[in-house]
Amino acid sequence: MLFKSRVFLVSYMILLAMPAGWLSAEILQDRQAPAGNKGKTIWDGVYTPAQAARGKESYTAHCSACHATDLTGRNGPALRGDHFMDNWREDSLNSLYNRIKNSMPAGNPSSLADDTYLDIVAHILQVNAFPEGAEELKPNTLVTIRVVGKEGPAPVPNFALVQVVGCLAQSSDNSWILSDASEPVRTRNPKESTESELKVSAATPLGEQTFRLLDVDYVRSGFTAAEHKGHKMEAKGFLIRNPGDLRLSTTWLEMLESSCMK
């Protein structure tokens, strides 16, 4: 398991080495929709055929060299199929839009019009066989549109970057755990949360999960877990699911409250 932990620490370092635009303010502020959100999903017809047709032209001109004409990937990753879905499901469509806008085209990110990026997202949805609708994608609706499988919402996939809220404690073997923790939700930001994000996390109720925290010593310079024992914490990291065992290869820990009671 230490091997897996080191693998995800390396993945974290790769994230930090990516262009600053990838961790733009828009991405840092994009969060899971609140529990009980009644917004649409990508199965509800959230783009039009005309928008996808425009997107196909823009994709061919600006994206196909790296991602292939049929979206199966070339120098860049595939934008269709099961692996693509696992990268983006249980998140909002806003995350995908921001990822494309803030990192593409390669070498010249954010150089296209916002509407062009929306059209490209519509094309990606069409190629992945998500149904068409009567209204075009709009910037102000992206955050309410959930990316889910055909069977509906499902647990966040293994090895996804997630965040949870819980109580920092030590187990019987003195390893660090997050007890009474909330269900993991996806995040695209492995680092420190914004002030508004921390307010959302502080209001998140405790749950029933327990996560073993790996790599706590690597979170950041000067962080001492013992100083936060018994505190309500926000934890971010790569999710590792084993039978009867949940772990986080931790990338960040932040105190929310100095006590931790349900």
Image: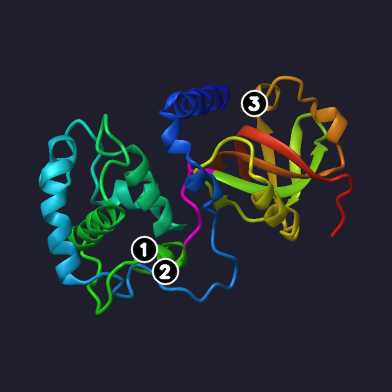
Q: Tell which residue pokes out farthest to the top in this image.
A: 221
The image shows residue 66, relative to residue 9, as above or below, that is: below
The image shows residue 76, relative to residue 155, as above or below, that is: above
Residue 215, disc = 3
Decide if residue 243 is in sight here.
no
Q: Residue drawn 24% across and 61% down? A: 122
Earlier along the polypeptide chain: callout 3 or callout 1? 1
For badge 2, the amino acid type reads: Gly
Residue indicated by mark 2: 152
Q: Residue drawn 31% across and 37% down? A: 109
Is the residue under label 1 in contact with that under label 2 (CB below 8 Å)? Answer: yes
Is the residue under label 1 in contact with that under label 3 (CB below 8 Å)? Answer: no
Callout 3: SS:
loop
Q: Is residue 1 left or right of residue 56?
A: right
Residue indicated by mark 1: 149
Q: Give the quadrant of residue 20.
A: top left
Magenta stretch: includes residue 233 = no
- Residue segment shown in magenta: 154-161
Where's residue 188, x and y in %? 49, 43
Q: How far is disc 2 from disc 3 in space, using C-alphas?
A: 33 Å
Please tell me how crowded label 3 is: few (under 14), some (14-19), or many (20+) other residues with Cα within 10 Å: some
Q: Is residue 60 left or right of residue 238?
A: left
